[in-house]
C-alpha cells in the first residue's frame, strides 16, 4: 500500500503480530465536534478553544489506547497532537489510507472498520496479520501487512521501466486473473491453438454433407468462418498460411487428432495437450454465441437506408434562371 505519511521519526518500521484498528474517521479537531458555542472576545476565550481541542484529541486517543493496538489505519487525517499521544503509547498510526486499501486490510487481518472511536470494541481489533513493515521503494514509502493467517484479499505491486511497459504488464495480469476467474466459475477447458475451431469446423462440414439444398449453406458458412482463427495464428507466426492450414485440416481427419493446433512460436502443427495450451470453455461459448447473434442480426436486415441528403428541388430543376 502506497503511503507518503509514514515518516514520523519515532514510528516503528516493523511490527510482528500487530493488533490493528481500522478507522474511517478523522483524528483531528474540527468545527462542530463540540456542542458548546464560544464567542471569542478576549485572550482567555482563545485559550479555552485550544483547551477544548486538546481535550477532544486526548479523549479519542484514549478510546484507541484502551484497546492496546499496535497499528491504527485511518482514511482521514491525524493531527500532530493525536500522533504525539499515540506514539507515546507505542502505537503506530498511518493516515490518509484509501478506502479500497482499508477494505483490503480489513479482509486480510480480520479487523472491522469503525466510524467512531467511542464505538471501538475488542472484537473490532484485527489480529490475523503476522508482520507489518515499511519499505522505501524508489522515492515512495510502502506499507506491507503480510504473513496473514487467513487472508481474503491481497495487493499486487507491479514495477516497470516506463509507464507504457507497466500498463502492458497490468493488462496482462488482468487478463490472467480473468482467465482464472472464468475457470473457477466454469471449470472446463478446451485445447487452444485453433484446435477446437478446426474440430468444430470439421463436424459442421460433415453435417452439411448429410443435407441437401439451401439447408447446408449455414453449416458450410460457419465451418469456413471458424478457420479464420487458425489462419490468423499461422499468419502471426510468419508461416505459410495455405500449406499449414491444409496440413491442419488433413490432420483433423485422422482419429484422436482433435487436440492438434498451431504452435504459436514455430508455426508448425503440435498437440496442444502436450504443450499445455488451454482455453476456458466459458470464453469460447460466449464468442460463438456473440458471433451467431451478430450474423442473425445482419440477416434480419431487409434493406439499407442511405444517409445521403436529397437535393433541393431548385437544384434538380437547374435553378430559377433555368430555361
Image (cartoon, helix red, strand yellow):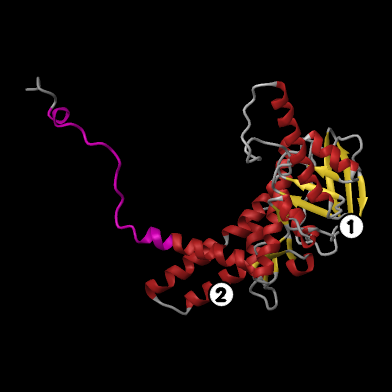
Q: Is residue 34 left or right of residue 206?
A: right
**Residue 305 x/y as whole percent:** 29, 48
Q: Is residue 72 left or right of residue 320?
A: right
Question: At numbered mark 1, what does the secondary structure look like: helix, strand or loop?
Answer: loop
Quadrant the N terminus occupies: top right
Instruction: Identify the residue position indicated by label 1 in the image.
Output: 130
First of labels 1, 2 by sequence position: 1
Q: Residues within 10 Å of mark 2 (few under 14, many from 20)?
A: few
Q: Is 123 in front, or is 282?
A: 123
Q: Residue 191: tell me if it is visible.
A: no
Asked if the magenta segment contains residue 313, the reply would be yes
Question: At numbered mark 2, what does the secondary structure look like: helix, strand or loop?
Answer: helix
Q: Is residue 9 left or right of residue 265?
A: right
Instruction: Identify the residue position indicated by label 2 in the image.
Output: 203
Q: Residue 26: tell me if it is visible.
A: yes
Q: Is residue 44 left or right of residue 143?
A: left
Vertical placement of residue 50 versus 226, above or below: above
* Residue interval drawn in magenta: 295-317
Q: Is 155 in front, or is 280?
A: 155
Amino acid at each position: 500500500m502506497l503511503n507518503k505519511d509514514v515518516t514520523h521519526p519515532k514510528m516503528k518500521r516493523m511490527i510482528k503480530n500487530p493488533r490493528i484498528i481500522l478507522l474511517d474517521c478523522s483524528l483531528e479537531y474540527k468545527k462542530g465536534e463540540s456542542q458548546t458555542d464560544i464567542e471569542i472576545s478576549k485572550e482567555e476565550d482563545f485559550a479555552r478553544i485550544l483547551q477544548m481541542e486538546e481535550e477532544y484529541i486526548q479523549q479519542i486517543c484514549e478510546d484507541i489506547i484502551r484497546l492496546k493496538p499496535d497499528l491504527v489505519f485511518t482514511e482521514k487525517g491525524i493531527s500532530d497532537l493525536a500522533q504525539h499521544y499515540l506514539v507515546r503509547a507505542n502505537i503506530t498510526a498511518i493516515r490518509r489510507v484509501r478506502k479500497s486499501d482499508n477494505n483490503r486490510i480489513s479482509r486480510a487481518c480480520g479487523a472491522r472498520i469503525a466510524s467512531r472511536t467511542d464505538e471501538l470494541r475488542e472484537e473490532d481489533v484485527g489480529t490475523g496479520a503476522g508482520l507489518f513493515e515499511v519499505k522505501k521503494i524508489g522515492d515512495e514509502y510502502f506499507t506491507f501487512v503480510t504473513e496473514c493467517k487467513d487472508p481474503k484479499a491481497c495487493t499486487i505491486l507491479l514495477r516497470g521501466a516506463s509507464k507504457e511497459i507497466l500498463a502492458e504488464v497490468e493488462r496482462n495480469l488482468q487478463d490472467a486473473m480473468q482467465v482464472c476467474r472464468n475457470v473457477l466459475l466454469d471449470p472446463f477447458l478446451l485445447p487452444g491453438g485453433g484446435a477446437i475451431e478446426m474440430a468444430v469446423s470439421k463436424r459442421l462440414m460433415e453435417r452439411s454433407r448429410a443435407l441437401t439444398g439451401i439447408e447446408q449453406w449455414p453449416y458450410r458458412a460457419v465451418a469456413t468462418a471458424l478457420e479464420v482463427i487458425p489462419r490468423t495464428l499461422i499468419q502471426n507466426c510468419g508461416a505459410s498460411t495455405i500449406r499449414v492450414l491444409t496440413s491442419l485440416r488433413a490432420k483433423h481427419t485422422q482419429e484422436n487428432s482433435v487436440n492438434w493446433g498451431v504452435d504459436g512460436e514455430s508455426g508448425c502443427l503440435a498437440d496442444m495437450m502436450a504443450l499445455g495450451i488451454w482455453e476456458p470453455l466459458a470464453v469460447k461459448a460466449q464468442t460463438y454465441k456473440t458471433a451467431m447473434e451478430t450474423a442473425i442480426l445482419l440477416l434480419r436486415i431487409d434493406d439499407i437506408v442511405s444517409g445521403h441528403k436529397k437535393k433541393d428541388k431548385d437544384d434538380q430543376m437547374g435553378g430559377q434562371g433555368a430555361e
